[in-house]
Image: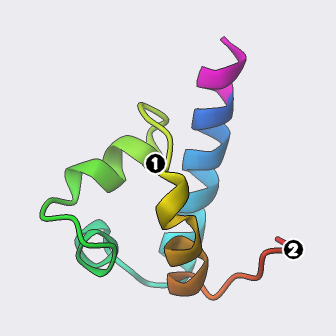
Amino acid sequence: MKSKFAHIIVGRYLKDQRVQSNLTQSQVAQSLGYTSPQFISNIERGLCSAPVKHLRGFLKLYNLSTDE
């Protein structure tokens, strides 16, 4: 249960950051090498976790530091 809750919190945070960065789910998906924005939607809704290998990509796209 804790894991699901964490996915939801992280997903909401990533969505907020994407919106503040004026990016669409399609733009993020394309930048991270996905063919469909559905995967980004699933992450943002907490249905799955963001792959660790793409966390730096999210940070770079959203102009965030590792401290945030």
Residue 44 located left or right of residue 55: left
- Residue 5 falls in image quadrant: top right
Q: Position of residue 32 (x, y in %)?
A: 33, 73
Residue at the spot 50% in from the left edge and 76% down from the top edge: 57
In the displayed structure image, the side of residue 36 where residue 44 appears, left or right? right
**Residue position marked by numbered label 2 in the rendering:** 67
Q: Residue at x 58, y 74 (%)?
A: 56
- Closest to the observer, 41 or 29: 29
Quadrant in which residue 48 is drawn = top left
Nearest to viewer (mark 2 / mark 1): 2
Q: Earlier in the sequence, mark 2 or mark 1?
A: 1
**Which quadrant would the C terminus be assigned to in this image?**
bottom right
SS at mark 1? helix
Q: Residue furthest front?
A: 53
Whether 51 is among the magenta residues is no
Residue type marked 1:
Glu
The span picked out in magenta is: 1-5
Tag of residue 44: 1
Task: Residue at 49%, 72% (x, y): give it.
Answer: 19
Prevailing SS of the magenta stretch:
helix
* Residues packed near mark 2 inside 10 Å, few (<14), some (14 to 19) or many (20 plus): few
Question: Circle 2 sits in a helix, a strand or a loop, which is it?
Answer: loop
User: In terms of depth relative to the viewer, which is nearer, 25 or 31?
Assistant: 31
Position in image of residue 66 (x %, y %): 78, 75
Q: Residues within 10 Å of mark 1 (few under 14, many from 20)?
A: many
Up the image or down, 9 lies above or below 67; here it is: above
